[in-house]
Amino acid sequence: MKNRIINIVIFVVAILACCVAIAFSFFSFDADKKENYIQTQEVKAKTPEMVSDLETATVESLPSVIEKYKEMNAESAEKQKEDQIQKDILYTYLQDLKNLDENSFEGYKAKFPERSASLFAKSNDKQKYVDGFNGVTTYKDLDGYTEKINKEYNEVKQNYLLERNYIKSANALISRADAINATASSTKKAADLESFQSDLKSFGKSASLQNFFIILTYILGIGALALMVFFLLTNMIANFKTSYKILLGLLLLVVAFFIGYLIGTPTLSPSAIKAGMTGSGYKMVNAACFTVYVCLFGAILAIIVSLIMNAVKNRN
């Protein structure tokens, strides 16, 4: 009776998760507009007023809206050029540090004042890097400092890539609006603008649905894991001698999580960008989702196998 209750509970959770997946697929936006959807979400995450202004623009006000955001995008592009200079300086400095060994360290340190003058000439943090390396007195201290600079570079690079994607998406969004504005026929211009605005609004609804289903999936996943841990602990206490099987199950979960992390993509989705996640953090989320899927499908398979075996035994 107890095992039947456990099977029913797990089966209900699995069915709910499948229903969520089917519903998300049904309500999802047109696959042909996926790129436009992603671009719109990237822009909305940083400058929601741009999307809002485009959604409410009229044929008469559209030119002023386009001009406003063309200027804003141009300013962002100029700032991006400066950010790239800072990124490249930090990358070059990091390569200097990584290429040092025990034999070349002292020579590099002796020539560092001259090297730093040219390397950090356009750096906004010249003194910080100079003081930082001057604080590395021996080669043994270099690894810790290099790791610190490596983490800083990864953060700078990630921010740079996010900003670059945003600028690309913002330019694409304004370009579509500009193409509509350049239409000679006033009737076609009005129709194209209405279609464009309809897409923007539908993208917003799709994003809301996506967030809803993601949250619901997390709730179901956490619930399934909580039930699994509860039943595992209960069985371990009741049948301590066979607890090795439970430990084996936990090991399989760890393996599933590790596989999920390896195959997970570090490319951030619009929702991840909005949440300020890093590439490694996003891979952790992918790994957790993969583990939940393995648990759910494993539970369904176990129930089916159990039902078949019970049916065979009952016939005998």
Image (cartoon, rainbow, N blue to C red):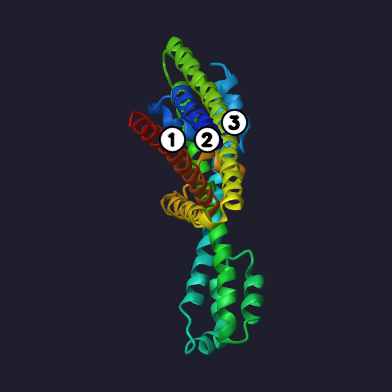
Q: Residue at x 42, y 24 (%)?
A: 30
The quarter holding residue 36 reads top left
Q: Nearer the viewer, mark 3 or mark 2?
A: 2
Q: Which mark is residue 10?
A: 2
For label 3, count other residues whose C-alpha is less than 10 Å away and answer few (under 14), some (14-19) or many (20+). Answer: many
Rendered-image quadrant of the C terminus: top left
Seen in the image, is 131 located left or right of residue 118? right
Q: Which mark is residue 56?
A: none
Q: Residue at x 41, y 51 (%)?
A: 263
Is residue 70 visible in this depiction of the protein? no
Which of the pair 108/30 is nearer the observer?
30
The quarter holding residue 179 reads top left
Q: Which mark is residue 50?
A: 3
Q: Which percent across, then down, holds residue 53?
A: 60, 25
Q: Name the residue carrying label 1.
A: 303
Farthest front residue in view: 316
The amino acid on which the numbered mark 3 sits, given as a three-letter code, is Met
Which of the pair 3/175 is nearer the observer?
3
Seen in the image, is 68 located left or right of residue 266? right
Do labels 2 and 1 touch, CB within 8 Å?
yes
Instruction: Answer with mark 2 or mark 1, whichever residue precedes in sequence.
Output: 2
The residues tagged by marks 2 and 1 sit, at their Cα atoms, a distance apart of 9 Å
Q: Secondary structure at mark 1?
A: helix
